[in-house]
Amino acid sequence: SVTGFIFVGLASQKDADLKHFEDRVKSWPEVRECHMLSGEVDFLLKCVAEDLSAFQALISTLTAEKNVDSVKSSLVIHASKVEPGVPVEI
């Protein structure tokens, strides 16, 4: 499988446009996490695809989506640390 991060910029950040994008993202099983950000990009997506072709197909789907202005991606070469959850002692 291929893991990658996709940085998405929207043309409009109106509430309805943000909600529409979030609803679309929820329908794509390859998107495992979606985070709205402040700063240069509007959303960061963590994606897992079967292979590179499937990852590229997801990017094509994203770029064709209404209101998407920019899409940049980075593939994961190696994960040095993966610890989900909150670092709290029990």
Image: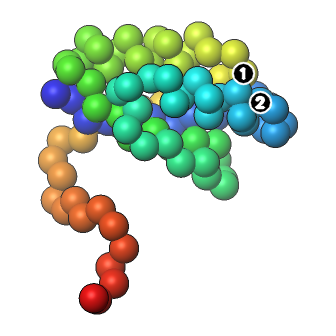
Image position of 46 with respect to 83: above or below = above
Q: Which colour scheme is used?
A: rainbow
Indicate the amino acid at tag 1.
Asn
The secondary structure type at the circle numbered 1 is loop
Q: Which residue is drawn at 16% across and 27% down?
A: 1
The C terminus lies in which quarter of the figure? Answer: bottom left
Q: Residue at x 53, y 19 (%)?
A: 62
Q: Neighbour class for label 1 at 10 Å: few (<14), some, many (≥20)?
A: some
Q: Please identify, in this view, whether the residue under mark 2 or under mark 1 is nearer the observer.
A: 2
**Residue under pointer 2:** 17
Q: Do the residues labelled 2 and 1 touch (CB within 8 Å)?
A: yes
Measure the C-alpha gap from mark 2 to mark 1.
Answer: 7 Å
Q: In this view, does 22 lie to the left or right of 78?
A: right
Image quarter of residue 56: top left
Q: Is 28 or 38 nearer to us in this picture?
A: 28
Image quarter of residue 15: top right
Q: Which residue is drawn at 47% across and 12% down?
A: 60
Q: Which of marks 2 and 1 is nearer the N terminus?
A: 2
Q: Which residue lies furthest to the front in this view?
A: 90
Residue 41, horizontal then vertical, whole percent: 61, 43
Residue 7, horizontal then vertical, whole percent: 51, 37
Residue 5, horizontal then vertical, whole percent: 38, 39
Q: Is 35 or 75 nearer to us in this picture?
A: 35
Tell me if residue 69 can be seen: no
Residue 11, horizontal then vertical, whole percent: 75, 28
Q: Is 70 or 49 nearer to us in this picture?
A: 49
**Residue under pointer 1:** 67
